[in-house]
Structure formats: structure tokens, C-alpha cells
Image: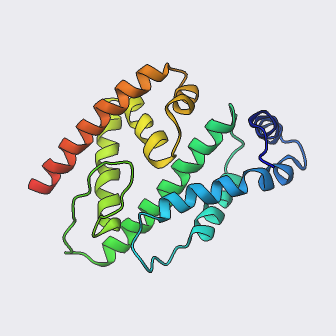
Amino acid sequence: MEPSSHQVTQLLQAWSEGEPGALDRLTPLVYDELHRLAGRHMAHERTGHTLQTTALVNEAYLALVDSVHANWQNRAHFFAVCAQVMRRILVDWARTRHALKRGGAVRLIELEESLAGAREPDAGLVALDDALQALAEVDARKARVVELRFFGGLTTDEAAAVLKISPETVLRDWKFAKSWLRRELTREKAV
């Protein structure tokens, strides 16, 4: 049986407040969704990637548990943060791997609903991360929309709830950000 969003939110808030056992009760309720989220991330990685889906979940879990207690707003906020943590883990892994292969050509990836088809997902993820960081310097909210929708797999309504903006604003930001990032990634390829 799927846990209710309200039940997850209550346990997240209890965990934030340091309630003993809250994390232990929360973990089984969110594990399957975390595994699906990690699976979406890993689906874009190259075959034979040394980091597997379960390992990515475990790494993200450890990062969250070791961090200072967050003030969780709700279930969507939690999964948005998890997506961001997973993205950071994969980007750091890709940067490390790419640094070991200095001189290798970085290939362009298009910002689409998935990274499927990228020949060098590690390099493409690094290029996308660099472009996303540049977008954050121009407009942090639009970069956050990309993080939530693209990396986190959140719906328009879920992203709107996390950012406390209207779904229409999320859609406008999403459209703008995709165009902006596509231009940046194309520009990077030309350089």
C-alpha cells in the first residue's frame, strides 16, 4: 500500500524535529520512490557504470542522514532535495572520471526529458551541470525548476508546491530554461 503524502510529511517533520525513530519509520515508506528516482538517474548513465541504482540510493541516504536536520516542507520538498543530492553525487563522479581522462572530448547532450542517447553521459552530465550553474547565476528559480523537473522528476504541480509559485510560472520557467540551456550547450560545443 502506497504511503499517504500526509503520512510522509508528518514523519519528515518529526525527523526534522529530532524525534527518535522517525527516520526509521520514514525510510521504508520512501525507499521505493527513492529507488525509482535513482533508477531514472542511472538510466541515463553509460552501461557498466560502477555506481548502481541501489548504491546511489545508499549514497544519497547517507548524505541526507549525515546532514544537519532540514526543515522539510512536505514530501515533494524531500524528493526534490533527494534528486539534488543524487545529481551532485553523479556529477561529482562524472567530474572525477572525466578528470582521469584529461584530454577526452566532451560531447553535447540536449536537454530533453531524459539523457537517453548521449554517447558520453558522464561528459554530457558535466556540461549540463556547468550550464545549469550558469543559469542559476542568471536566474536561480529557473535553474531550480530544471533541477526539480529534469533531475527530480517532479510534476509541474509538485515543483510549484516546492517553490511556492503557480504551476503556470513553473511551465514558463521550464520553457525558458530549456531554451536557455540548449543555447548554452550549443555554444559550449562550438567553443
- Model colouring: rainbow
- Quadrant location of residue 46? bottom left
Q: How many marks?
A: 0
39 above or below 1? below
Residue 53: x and y in percent read: 57, 68
Residue 10: x and y in percent read: 81, 35
Residue at the image point whose x is 44% and y is 67% from the top: 93
Residue 63 visible in the current orientation: no
Farthest residue to the left: give it.
190
Residue at the image point whose x is 29% and y is 30% from the top: 176
Residue 103 visible in the current orientation: yes
Farthest residue to the right: give it.
20
33 above or below 98? above
- 99 on left or right of 159: left
158 above or below 56? above
Residue 68: x and y in percent read: 69, 45
Residue at the image point whose x is 21% and y is 64% from the top: 107
Residue at the image point whose x is 36% and y is 28% from the top: 173
Classify the position of the C terminus by image quarter.
Answer: bottom left
- 163 on left or right of 138: right
Farthest residue to the front: give it.
1
- 170 on left or right of 85: left
